[in-house]
Amino acid sequence: DLSFSHTKLNDADWEALGRLVTMQRLFLKRMKPMLQDECVPSLLQLRKLQLIGLEDNDLSFDGTEKLLHGLSPCQLTELRVRGSFDVSGRTKSQLASKYPHVALL
């Protein structure tokens, strides 16, 4: 497990994070404005992730969908996105219908 909260990561940090390919659980909380869609390619390298917590970040719906698309064929079973964007109603339904095996919390 690896957890960051209120942490400022630069491009080199994101690249290094993407090299932790055996990680199974990652929590990136309250990292506005550092965690944005530009970070998704680094996160997509983490093919063994089972759980990723992205609460209270600036990742958009599109960035979240790219992350789900890239990681859901792997082992991802849970994505926590509270506070990142509106995951209620239609938005959550759209993601849940495309990725039914990933719990969206």
Image: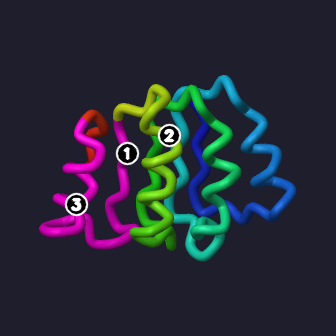
Task: Give the image location of residue 11, x and y in percent.
Answer: 82, 62
Residue at (59% x, 70% y) in the render: 36
Task: Give the image location of residue 99, x and y in percent.
Answer: 29, 44
Residue at (75% x, 54% y) in the render: 14
Spatial CA span between label 3 and label 1: 14 Å
Q: Which residue is mark 1?
A: 79
Three-letter code, disc 1: Leu
Q: Which residue is mark 3?
A: 94
Three-letter code, disc 3: Gln
Does residue 77 lie above or below 66 as drawn? Answer: above
Q: What number is the disc on residue 71?
A: 2
Spatial CA span between label 1 and label 2: 10 Å
Pick the front one: 70 or 37 = 70
Task: Give the image location of residue 57, x and y in percent.
Answer: 49, 67
Spatial CA span between label 3 and label 2: 17 Å
Q: Is residue 95 on the magenta stretch?
A: yes
Left or right: where 15 falls relative to 46: right
Q: Magenta segment range?
A: 78-100
Left or right: where 97 falls relative to 43: left
Left or right: where 95 falls relative to 51: left
Q: How many callouts does the rendering have?
A: 3
Residue at (45% x, 48% y) in the render: 69
Q: Return the disc, 1 or 2, that comes first in the chain's sequence.
A: 2
> Quick one: label 1, few (<14), some, or many (20+) residues within 10 Å?
many
Q: Secondary structure at mark 1?
A: strand
Q: Quadrant of residue 86?
A: bottom left
